[in-house]
Image: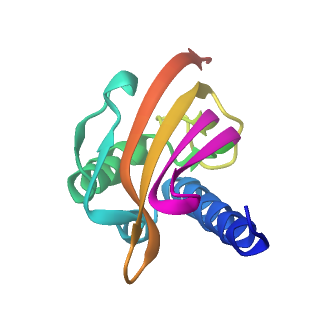
Amino acid sequence: MTQRVDLATVMDRLAIDEVVSGYAVAVDDGDWSAYRALFTASGRADYRSAGGIEGPAAEVADWLAQTMTLFPVRQHLIVNRLVRLEARSGWPADAAEVRADFLNPMRLAGPEFDGSVTAPNFVAAGRYTFALARTAGDGWRLSRVTVQEKWRHVSG
């Protein structure tokens, strides 16, 4: 590979990482406009393995906005990111896949939740698969997000 191709690959990987991190921040902050903006026009999300729904990103954002009210305190940690760029003729293509593990400590709302105790009492973990596409105007965007929850723990 030439130095120019290497630099393009590094730039793509950084841009893709920013989208994945932006996803975690949008969910944790409840910024559903930012969440929607991370997806392509036909982007979809699948939360079925965690008891959620699958569908167009805009519909899933609406569902998340309602569901996440149950968890007033939440934090996504997305780690062990494996980024695969589809290469054609030695040049990075316009598609990528990221497999990444997640740990998601959250605080369940309830009658006893007054905001003074923020320690998590619900933790979920598993793996995300992010499919991304390079768009003409917005750069890399999510075309699909799939959650594969592996375990969860609820404490009192």
Q: Note whether 88 is above or below 32 in the view shown.
A: above
Q: Residue at (62%, 46%) from the top-left corner?
A: 83
| Quadrant of res 39 | bottom left
**Is any atom of residue 73 visible in this view?**
yes
- Residue 98: image x %, image y %? 55, 44
Q: Note whether 75 is above or below 149 in the view shown.
A: below
| Closest to the observer, 53 or 143 | 143
Q: Residue at (52%, 48%) from the top-left corner?
A: 72
Q: Note whether 107 is above or below 21 in the view shown.
A: above
Magenta stretch contains residue 84: yes
| Quadrant of res 82 | top right
Q: Residue at (69%, 48%) from the top-left corner?
A: 116
- Residue 88: image x %, image y %? 48, 55
- Residue 106: image x %, image y %? 59, 37
Magenta stretch contains residue 53: no
Q: Main secondary structure of the magenta part?
A: strand
As drawn, the residue found furthest toward the bottom would be 137
Q: Magenta residues? A: 79-103
| Closest to the observer, 133 or 32 | 133
Answer with left or right where residue 19 lies relative to residue 60: right
- Residue 34: image x %, image y %? 44, 70
Q: Residue at (49%, 54%) from the top-left corner?
A: 27
